[in-house]
């Protein structure tokens, strides 16, 4: 017990220090967990140990909770709407990737046919854990490339089931292919029928009962019961834990509880994912890696290039070049479910021990590289195409005497509409990607970025602008933006929306030209309208909050 506590203490200490350093370097905390696992593995000689099964099980439930949160966002209506990109794009990506990788493994590396099939299928999968975590955190999950990437990831996660069944079939000479298919279809039917009939009623009753009880711990206990129960049911029927969690999430997505459920389990999901990445780190054998350095990197680069090219060509058929490149970058790595495939194939003696270790090492390094790719996905995409949304890569505009609107929430939208009515030249800058997409849909010139960055100020020609209208809500953002604009161009005509007199006092030290008190101006306008003669509004005037 003492040694276990010591390992936990050292692990937490190393992870904390590493992540503090990595955070300052703008590197994903995922890398910190993986490196911590590697360090602990070498300190306590975990490599090849069978004592990590409990840790790996805990880590696997990090993926379970992640898949559950995916299910919460994929309602039946949304899945039906996305069915083409989920099942068509997903199937083409997995099959095409496997067809290209198979001959490479079989003929170049002279690996037997069965092993080459397993490798090709496993390498066709991408990392749901890393990519989805980034997409949710960055809000890119609502962008065109984000939606297409999620759709392919969903299919890949579903494809894990037949791949694992194929391994079981190849390892068992007693079962025929027809027996395996019949067993799989029956099991899948039982799981789906139960989950969407009696299971759905149980889930709704539990959530409704725990909500009425007004006990937070009871509600959380109900959610954990649902997730773990659905996962265990799927696993007992021969499927992955995550499939049951995904279905449970989809059921809850149809209820009014999905927002609260997701917020309540967020911290648990993050802790379990940390354990998952820690367990990945323990699989890195430094000695083996150093002796096979060039081969590992060669296989990794080849696989990522093949997958990136296939995803790009697939998405490019119906999307622009920018979305296609970002989708390719997001999905070019090898995924965490490949570990399950290689581990099972090795235990069933389909893959040799040495080959299994090599493949696991390639997969681990792929997942180490992935956070660097996804965290800089806009910057990397900008090298291939002029990226409209990357704040550091905005192409300098050819404008003068224009108005710059900072922020595109309700007030920003009204300002844009009024300027558009008057024929005044303007552009929008926002750090909310959804707002930028909305502005572009309405035909406005809008950029994703931060107005406190000098490259952005230069690209938007602030020194040649007629005015800068700041509509953001938080005081700290107003201060940062206004100070940055004035530091760059002291003569800038700054017009700032404020919500209170306290905000005006806090901004008094900055040379802002005009303040507009939102509540005060609204009150003045209400009085003015109440005293004016009743005039029927023109039919072409739309609602202000449109």
Image (spheres, grey):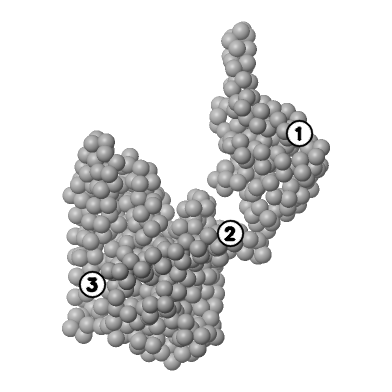
Report crowding for label 1: few under 14, some 14 to 19, many 20 or more residues within 10 A (C-alpha). Answer: some
Q: Is residue 5 above or below residue 221?
A: below
Is residue 215 among what the camera can see? yes
Quadrant position of the N terminus in the picture: bottom left
Quadrant position of the C terminus in the picture: top right
Q: Residue at x 62, y 40 (%)?
A: 477
Q: Earlier in the sequence, mark 3 or mark 2?
A: 2
Q: Is residue 78 above or below residue 511?
A: below
Label 2 with label 1: CB-CB less than 8 Å: no
Alpha-carbon span between mark 2 and mark 1: 32 Å
Report crowding for label 3: few under 14, some 14 to 19, many 20 or more residues within 10 A (C-alpha). Answer: some
The residue singled out by tag 1 in the image is 511
Residue 49 percent location from the top left of the image: 32, 80
State the mark number for residue 181.
3
Residue 50 percent location from the top left of the image: 29, 78
Q: Earlier in the sequence, mark 3 or mark 1?
A: 3
Residue occupying the far bottom of the picture: 110
């Amino acid at each position: 017990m003492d040694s276990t506590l010591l390992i936990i203490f050292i692990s937490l200490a190393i992870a904390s220090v590493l992540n503090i350093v990595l955070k300052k370097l703008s590197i994903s905390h995922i890398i910190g967990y993986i490196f911590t696992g590697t360090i602990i593995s070498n300190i306590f000689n975990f490599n090849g140990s069978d004592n990590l099964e409990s840790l790996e099980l805990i880590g696997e439930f990090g993926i379970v909770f992640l898949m559950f949160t995916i299910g919460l966002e994929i309602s039946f209506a949304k899945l039906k709407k996305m069915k083409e990109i989920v099942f068509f794009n997903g199937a083409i990506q997995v099959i095409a990737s496997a067809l290209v990788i198979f001959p490479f493994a079989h003929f170049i590396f002279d690996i037997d046919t069965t092993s080459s099939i397993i490798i090709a299928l496993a390498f066709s999968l991408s990392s749901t854990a890393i990519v989805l975590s980034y997409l949710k955190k960055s809000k890119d999950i609502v962008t065109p490339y984000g939606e297409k990437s999620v759709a392919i990831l969903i299919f890949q996660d579903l494809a894990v089931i037949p791949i694992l069944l194929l391994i079981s079939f190849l390892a068992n000479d007693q079962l025929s292919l027809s027996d395996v298919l019949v067993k799989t279809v029956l099991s899948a039917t039982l799981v789906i029928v139960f989950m969407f009939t009696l299971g759905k009623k149980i889930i709704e009753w539990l959530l409704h009962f725990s909500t009425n009880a007004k006990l937070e711990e009871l509600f959380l206990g109900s959610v954990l019961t649902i997730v773990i129960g659905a996962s265990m049911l799927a696993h007992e029927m021969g499927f992955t834990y995550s499939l049951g969690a995904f279905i449970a999430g989809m059921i809850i997505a149809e209820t009014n509880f999905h927002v609260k459920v997701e917020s309540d389990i967020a911290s648990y999901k993050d802790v379990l994912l940390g354990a998952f990445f820690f367990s990945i780190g323990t699989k890195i054998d430094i000695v083996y890696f150093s002796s096979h350095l060039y081969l590992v990197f060669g296989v990794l680069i080849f696989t990522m290039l093949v997958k990136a090219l296939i995803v790009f060509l697939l998405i490019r058929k119906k999307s622009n070049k920018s979305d296609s490149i970002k989708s390719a970058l997001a999905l070019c790595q090898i995924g965490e479910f490949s570990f399950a495939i290689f581990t099972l194939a090795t235990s069933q003696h389909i893959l040799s021990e040495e080959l299994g270790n090599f493949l696991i090492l390639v997969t681990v390094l792929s997942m180490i590289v992935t956070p660097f790719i996804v965290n800089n996905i806009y910057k990397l995409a900008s090298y291939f195409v002029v990226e409209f949304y990357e704040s550091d890569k905005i192409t300098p505009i050819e404008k003068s005497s224009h108005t710059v609107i900072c922020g595109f929430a309700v007030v920003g939208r009204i300002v844009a509409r009024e300027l558009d009515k008057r024929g005044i030249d303007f552009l929008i800058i926002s750090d909310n990607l959804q707002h930028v997409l909305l502005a572009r849909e309405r035909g406005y010139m809008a950029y994703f970025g931060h107005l406190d960055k000098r490259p952005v100020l230069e690209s938007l020609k602030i020194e040649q602008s007629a005015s800068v209208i700041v509509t953001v809500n938080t005081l700290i953002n107003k201060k940062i933006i206004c100070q940055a604009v004035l530091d760059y161009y002291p003569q800038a005509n700054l017009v700032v929306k404020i919500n209170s007199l306290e905000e005006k006092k806090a901004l008094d030290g900055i040379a802002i030209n005009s303040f507009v008190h939102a509540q005060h101006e609204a009150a003045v306008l209400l009085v003015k309208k109440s005293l004016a003669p009743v005039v029927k509004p023109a039919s072409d005037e739309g609602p202000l909050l449109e």
